[in-house]
Image (spheres, helix red, strand yellow):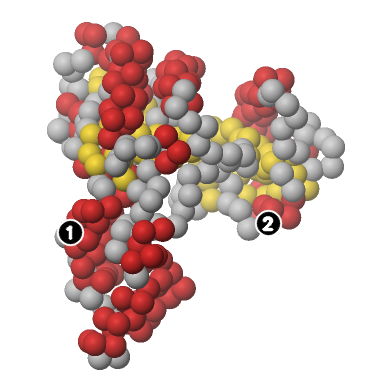
Amino acid sequence: MDQITQSSLQDSLLNEDFISKWTKNRILHFDLDCFYAAVEMRDNPALRNVPLAIGGPANSRGVLCTSNYLARSFGVKSAMSSNLAVKKCPKLLILPPDFKKYKAASRAVFDIFHQYTNKVEGLSLDEAFLDITDLCTSNFASDIAREIKKKVFQQTGLTISVGASYNKFLAKVASDWMKPDGFYVIPPTHRQRFMSDLDIKYIFGVGQKSRERLNAKKIFNCADIQNTPMADLKQIFGSRYLDMFYMSHGIDFRKVDGEGERKSFTCELTFNDDVKDPLMLMQRLFRVYSEWHGRFQKWQSNAEEAGPNVSTLVVKVKYFDFKQTTHETRFRGDYSFVEFQKLLEHILAKRAEPIRLLGLGVRLGKAEEHTQMTFL
C-alpha cells in the first residue's frame, strides 16, 4: 500500500466526528503512592526517613508488596525477593503487611471517590478509575481532580497521584507521569502532540517481551506505529492490530466499569520450605481452608444483598520450579473441606513433586462463565 493510500485509510479511521465522539469523556485515574508503606509511615512518623518495605522477612522465601521511595532509590522494588532487597539495601526495614489496616485506609479513600460519582472502578486497594463526565460543565476535569486529591490528603494523611484525560489509557499514563504526589492532565487538544513521542511501553497490553519484539522491528514510540502500514500492523499484532492502531493515536474504547462484580473468592499460602509429604500438604490445605472459610462466611454475612452464586470449587498449587496447576469441580451445594481435599488428591496423583504454594477458593457466577478463566 503506497503512502498516499495509507494516509487516506488512516484519515478515514480517524475522521473528525470519530475523534469528537471518543474524546468527550472525562476520566480520572487515582493511584495512592507506595500505599502500604505510606500507611505505615503515616501511623509511625519515625519510619518516614528510613528505607522501608512491606513483605516477608529476609530469612524467609517472602517477597515485597511495596517499598517507600527511599528504599526504591537503592533499587528495591515490589515483587522482589526479600533476600535480594536486603542485599541491595542492607539497612532496609521490612515490616509484615497489616491488611486490616490497609483495607480501612482504602475504604476511607474510596468513600471520598463515591462522594463525587458512582462510576468508580477499583483496580486494587490503592488504585481506581473515576468517570466524572457528567460532572464536568467546564472545559476539563482539573478542578474536580485537584479537589479529590486534596480531600484524600486532608482526611487520610495519604498522598495520591492523579491523571486526568478523556479515556482510561491516557488517564493511567498521566497518573504515572509525575509520581509521587503527582498531578498531570492530557486534554484532547494535546492528543496528537503527546502521542507522537509516547514510548510503546505505556500502551495497554505491551509488556517487556512485546516491547523487545517491537523494538527489533524499529517500533519504539507511538509515531512509529502510526506510520506503519496497516497490512504490516496486522502481521505484527494479529487480531489486536486495530486496537494498537487506535491506542497509538490516543483512542481507547474501554469504559469505566462502576458495576463490576466479584468473580472469585480465594485464599493461598506460600510455604517457607517446599512440601512433598501428602499428609503435611493436607494439613496445610486445612489451614488455608480455615482461613478462607472464615473470610468467606464473613463476606457473605456482610453483603447488603445476596451475592453471586458459587459456581466452581478450585484448588491451585505452585511447584518448586514455579510451574502451577489447578483442578476444579462444579459446585453441588457443598464447599466443606472434604471437597477441596478431593481436588488436591487429584492434583497429587498427577504430579507428586515438592510444592511451594497452595491455594483454594470458589468462583462466583454461572459455571459456564468460568470455563476459560485462570485461578486468582
For residue 315, above or below residue 118: below
Q: Nearer the viewer, residue 269 or 33?
A: 33
Lower position in the chain sequence, tag 1 or tag 2: 1
Give the residue number, with chain letter if any, for mark 1.
Answer: 193
> What is the x, y in percent for residue 126?
40, 30
Q: Residues within 10 Å of mark 2 (few under 14, many from 20)?
A: few
Inter-mark Cα distance, 1 to 2: 43 Å
- Residue 265, picture quadrant: top right
For residue 275, above or below residue 318: above
Tag 2's secondary structure?
A: loop
**Residue 90 falls left or right of residue 63:** left
- Quick check: can you spot residue 7? yes
For residue 351, above or below residue 67: below
> What is the x, y in percent for residue 128?
42, 36
Quadrant assignment for the N terminus? bottom left
Tag 1's secondary structure?
A: helix
> What is the x, y in percent for residue 70?
17, 26
- Quick check: can you spot residue 37? no
The amino acid pointed to by label 1 is Arg
Give the residue number, with chain letter if any, for mark 2.
Answer: 371
Q: Nearer the viewer, residue 309 or 257?
A: 257
